[in-house]
Structure formats: C-alpha cells, structure tokens
Amino acid sequence: MTLVEFKGVWTRPDFPDRQIVNEVYRFYSRFEPRPDDVVVDLGAHIGAFTKVYCGNVARAVAFEPNPEVLPALQQNCSEVGAEARSMAVTVDGRDCQFSWPPRNHKGDSMCSTVPRGRVPEGIPLKLVNVRSTAFSDLVAELSPTVLKLDMEGAEHEFLQQIPEVASLRHVLCEILVTRGAWRKAAGVFVEAMATAGYQATWSHGITDKSWNYVYSFERRP
C-alpha cells in the first residue's frame, strides 16, 4: 500500500484519513505528554495520535482491530518507537467481529459480537473476525499512565472500569452517545471520574445534539 505523509502522519490517499489527522490536532492539542508516561491508544486507527504526541514518552502501545489500516499504523508507530497491536480491546477478551464500511465512505466502524450496521441504508458492511484482549489484562500488563480512547461505541463495554485504574493520571476519550443508554452511561462515567479524583480539564461537543463527547480528565494532585 502506498502511503502519503500529511502533517507529519502517514495516511492512505484513497481514504478519509486526513480528516482524522486534523481531528487529532484539533481535539488533543492541549495534551502534554511526560517523558515517563506509558500511553495506551485504544482505537488508534492509522496511529495519528500516537505519531503526533507519543514520540518522547517511555512507552506507547496502539491497539487497532481494522486490518486495512495496519500498514499505516505500523509505519506511524515505528517512527516514534511505539508498538502497534492489531487487535480489539473488549471487556472479556473474547474474539469478536469487526465491521467497517467500504472505501471512501465516512460511516463508522466498530468491534462487536454482532455487526451493528449503523451506516446509511444500501451501504454494505465488511466483516472480519479479530483477536481481542481484555481491558483488565491490558491494564495489568502495561500499567498505563495515559489512556486515549476512540472506539466508535465499543468503549461502553468497559467504560465504567476506567476510574478504577490506579496507574492513570490522564484520560482522553471520545464517547459515542448515539443511543440513549450510551448518553446516560457517559454521564455516569463523568460522575465516576470525579469521584475517583479526576477533573475534566476540557471537552468538545458537549451539547444535547452531539453524537459524541470528547473529554480530557486529569487526576487531581
């Protein structure tokens, strides 16, 4: 696959990867990594966040189940000394199905036990079985200090476990709220983070009409 560099990130020319790169710069520009950080990037896609922000951390590991983005993910991670893992992260570690729309379509994608099909009518989804690791196992292995999530709804499987992760100092997360239960769960999560000692330092898209919320939580000293 031929990759094209855009704003310091390797992208696929026939896909809307440039939009993702622009969002990474826009959403996370206030994130300040530390040299001793262990950063875990869940839903890394082409690895734009890892490439832009994780060049000077102790360790960075990017997880992404979509096999079509693997060449770009590996290239971006290798240039900053990060590790790319082609797998999903779930609540129980069971292998699952990954669904995504065809090339050039801006519909969403996700890992689930059954295909969700949340793209416009008439747009067929591709399906592939992917390996998975449990979120709890990931935490036990890596002891992350920074967690970034952009998982198109799959984060709801283990969202409420995140406030309990003792090693974390900073959580950056996009939470999908296209379902009523997900919107309610996002509110519960924000309250749980506050109870666990985190402060919401900034956010994007927090309106009643938003389909996703992007939060930055930092643990209080």
Image (cartoon, rainbow, N blue to C red):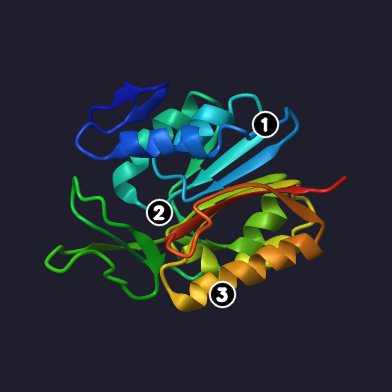
Label 1 belongs to which residue? 32
The picture places residue 152, in percent across and down from the top left corner, at 42, 59
Residue 93 seen in the figure? no
Specify the farthest residue to the right. Answer: 221
Amino acid at the residue labelled 2: Pro
Does dot 3 land on a helix, a strand or a loop?
Answer: helix
**Relative depth, front residue between 20 and 11:** 20
- The residue drawn where x is 72% and y is 44% is 145
Which residue does the numbered mark 3 point to in the structure image?
Answer: 184
Mark 1 and mark 2 residues within 8 Å of each other at the beta carbon: no
Q: Gap in Å between the C-alphas at discs 2 and 3?
A: 27 Å
Q: Secondary structure at mark 1?
A: loop
Residue 99 occupies quadrant? bottom left
Rendered image quadrant of residue 189: bottom right
Residue at the extreme left: 122
Q: Earlier in the sequence, mark 1 or mark 3?
A: 1
101 over 7 or under it: above or below: below
* Residue 133 falls left or right of residue 116: right
Of marks 1 and 2, the one in the foreground: 1
Dot 1 or dot 2: first in sequence order is 1
| Residue that carries the numbered disc 2 in the rendered image | 65
Image coordinates of residue 206 in percent, x first then y, are: 53, 56
Amino acid under disc 1: Glu
Q: Residue at x 15, y 69 (%)?
A: 121
